Structures are given as C-alpha cells and as structure tokens.
Amino acid sequence: LACTEDISRMDDGSFLRTLEQKYTGRGSLSNDDDNLEAGLWRRGMCAFLSSTNDVKLFLEETIQYVLGNANIDDEEEQNGSFLYGKEVVLRFLLHLILLLDSLTSDHESFSAFRESVIVPYHNDLTYLYLRRLMMQKPLWPFTCLYASLLPNEIMIDTCVDFWMNDIYDDNDRRMILNKAREYFAEGLDLIILRRVVRSSIVASHHHPPMELLNNFVRANVGIDQRSFEKKIGKEDIMKMHTIRWLCFHDEHYADALVCVNMLIRQFLLDVKTDTNDDEIGDWSGDIKLRTAKLFKSRFLPPDLIQKARNCGALQVANGDVNFSDEVHDYSNEHEALVSFLDAHSAYEVWKDLIMTLPESVDYQYGMNVPQGSLESEIAAKIEKRNFIQ
C-alpha cells in the first residue's frame, strides 16, 4: 500500500502520462515523432481504459496508418533507414490483434468487434511483419512461426519466394526446415520444398550471393579442375545447391531423386553436339557435361537411391500403392544417367592414355614435313584423332 500511495492520488490524465513516460523511457519511441503519430501510446492506453468502441477506433486508425505506409517502409528498409519505432509499432499492433483474437474468439458478444477489426487486418499485419522478419537474418528463426498464422495459400507462396531467393546456406536451410516442420501442418514443408527446388531448376537467378559463388571453386584440386569450376555458370551453381533442400530428411529423398534426374537431364540436353572438323566430337570439353559429372560426384548423397526406395515403401505402407512403382522408374532412370556419366569418364581416361602412348605405325607426313617440327606434331594429333574416332 505504501508503494502505491502516490499512484492512488493521481487522476486519470496524470496516471496515463506517468505510464507513457515509463514505457517510452526504455526506447526511442517518444523521440520518433516524424514516423509515429504523436501521442500514439497515450491514445492507445486511453482507449483501452475507456470503451470497446474507443479501442475499435484506435486500432482502425493506427492499423490503417501502418498498412498505408507499408510501401514507403519497404523503400526505407532497402535503403537501411527503417526506424526502430516503426518496427515496434508494427510488432505491438500485430501481437495486440493476436491477443484480442484469443480473448474474444469464444465470446459471442464480441463478434461484431472481431468482424470489424480483427478479421479484416489479421492477415495483412501478419504478412507485413513476416516480411520484416525475412529482411533481417537474425530473425529468420521466427519466420515459420508467423507464417503459420497465415492461410495456407498465402503461407506457401510467401515461403516459396523467401526460401528460393534468400536462403542459400545449408545451415540456414536446415534451421528453417526444422522450424517449418515444428509449426506447419504435416506435409506442408514438402509441398513448399517441391515448389522451391523445381522452380529453382527452371528459373533464372539474376543475383546469386557472391559468398556462395566464391566458396564453390575449391582450392584443393588441380589447376585444370579449378579452371573448369570457375567457368561453371552462376545459375547452374544455384541449381545444384538447391537440391540440398531435399536431402535433410529421409522422407524427402523420393522427391530429391526426381529433381536430381530433372537437373541432370537439363545439363545433358544443353550439351553441344555440333563439332568442328578438327574436333573429335566426344563432348569431352563440354562445360555442361562436366557440370553434370561434378554435380553427381560433389552434391549427390551416396545413398540417394536406397533412401528414395525406402521412402517409396513407406508411402505404400501409408496407402499410396503406386508410389513405389514411380520411385522404381525414377531409380532406373537415375542409374542409367549415372552409368552414362561414368562410361564417358572411363572413356576420357582411356583417351588420355592413348594420347600418351607411342604410335604403332610410322606416320607419312609428306616430303615437306620435317620430323620434330610443329607441323609433324599437328599431323600426329590428327592421326590420333582419327584413330580415336
């Protein structure tokens, strides 16, 4: 009683001013008049101490202000000038709406209030706050929680865009996926991943992160291999990395197998089959073929087919009788693609060996081609090319 004696003597206006000063003293909100409506906190407290209608008017006015400035705030965020006060107001409004939603959901007497304030603004505020979280990497662990508050269609579209265009590191992928499996309904994580990976395979990535590109070229390989890795297209690097989304959990491996086959087929279809007269025409130097081999050796789990088949068997046990046959077909296709890549690699080993062996017969260079000259070396290469062909 002694501690509250001074407060008990205050009138309503003095009490509100004291409460406002105590709250704003912990941050920069009271000094941010250029970006927040003057007296926002005081008007809010007055509204909640007055009537339901005053709360309704306060929320409608404040939420419309925040949503009306959303596009301007996006530009400020991109320019690095988004102010702390705006972030606090948005977070306060969203959590206030969520609190009121939970308090009034079972009370018929508040149905009109819910229909006029909570229902119209719930999704817009949640989506806007989710976008703020996505713009700040330290807050990424919270994105799935708030995404789960949105309708499934909006949640899926938002997550697909965010996961595909902003998340590149395997640790971030694993963290986000684990959070999704914690907060989303069962199976939604796989629906999102299917769209993320398949869209990434067919999409163009205009601005892949430089950190990802720089780490792709390995330092512990030969000069020829390092030179080749530097030539791989940025989009192909992105496509190979995106397959890893499906390699964190065993039940995703069937979809991983499908997407792996898609990407290898894409690489092989882009192999240039037209050759010049002075080329052997075995595609040995083709960048796409070499990329497909690198993808197989560097990115694919060694137990991909086995885990995909286990996944198929699990789906059959759950009632999907055709799933196992589909996995079997994709497994056969994958083995055929891998066999082709391995056969071509074996051929290249053989060709390199042949090129180092002495000739079994003397070449007839002609009277005007002296032995040991540049012309004789070119002629020898032509003969070896013809032999290989």
Image: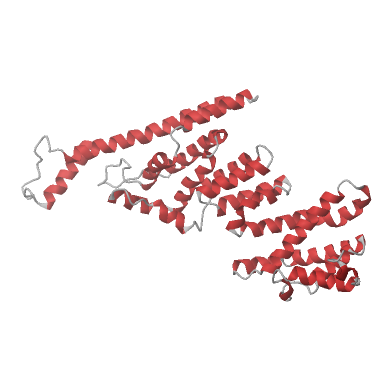
Q: How many marks?
A: 0
- Say if 14 sits above or below 183 in the image: below
* Residue 244 image offset from top left, x and y in percent: 50, 43
User: Would you say residue 119 is visible in this rendering?
Assistant: no
- Say if 331 sits above or below 136 in the image: above
Residue at horizontal 46 percent and vertical 42 percent from the top:
266
- Say if 138 sits above or below 84 in the image: above
User: Would you say residue 285 is visible in this rendering?
Assistant: yes
Foreground of the two, 239 or 92: 92
Q: Residue furthest right?
A: 109
Residue at horizontal 17 percent and vertical 40 percent from the top:
356
* Residue 18 image offset from top left, x and y in percent: 82, 72
- Say if 29 sits above or below 359 in the image: below
* Residue 201 in the figure: left or right of residue 158: left
Residue at horizontal 50 percent and vertical 51 percent from the top:
169
Quadrant location of the N terminus in the rendered image: bottom right
Foreground of the two, 333 or 218: 218
